[in-house]
Image: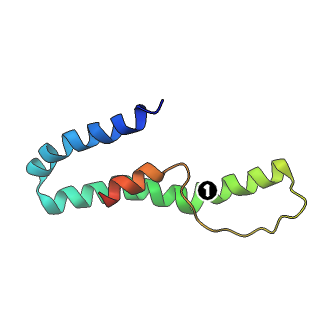
Amino acid sequence: KPLVVPLFFFVSGYFAPSSLRRKGRASFLRSNAMRMGGVFLVFWLVFNPCMQFFGASLVRPTMYSPSYFPTSPHTWFLLWLLVF
């Protein structure tokens, strides 16, 4: 299992230069931002709060204050692909 995530990053980095050459810098950045950034934002703003709410309702903690601080535990790799 520790090999799977680095393999995904390797494959992404392997195909990035050819895509960059084919599309050009502006189109490459725009398409990646729309494809990965859109998915990241939808999860961050919609699905993550739902998962926190349903998780708290299933566990029913005794001292629970419903607040939301956006995190990205399930889509951290999309954020890193966007950064690099």
> Would you call the spot at circle 1 few (<14 residues within 10 Å), some (14-19), or many (20 or more)?
many
Where residue 41 sits: x, y (%)?
47, 61
For the residue pair 37 and 8, the one nearer the viewer reads as: 8
Residue 11, relative to residue 22: is it above or below? Answer: above
Q: How many marks?
A: 1
- Quarter location, residue 53: bottom right
Where residue 10 sits: x, y (%)?
28, 39
Farthest-out residue, front: 2
Residue 22, relative to residue 40: is it above or below? Answer: above
For the residue pair 21 and 38, the one nearer the viewer reads as: 21
Where residue 4 sits: x, y (%)?
41, 32
Asked whether, in this view, residue 3 is left or right of residue 51, the answer is left
Residue 2, relative to residue 40: is it above or below? Answer: above
Residue visible at 46% across and 33% down?
2
Asked whether, in this view, residue 51 is left or right of residue 22, the answer is right
Asked whether, in this view, residue 48 is left or right of residue 1, the answer is right
Residue indicated by mark 1: 48
- Quarter location, residue 47: bottom right
Where residue 32 sits: x, y (%)?
29, 54
- Badge 1 marks a residue whose secondary structure is helix
Farthest-out residue, right: 62
Residue visible at 33% across and 60% down?
83
The quadrant of the picture occupied by the C terminus is: bottom left
Asked whether, in this view, residue 4 is left or right of residue 54, the answer is left
Three-letter amino acid code at the position of disc 1: Asn
Residue visible at 67% across and 68% down?
68
Residue visible at 67% across and 56% down?
50
How is the rendered protein coloured? rainbow
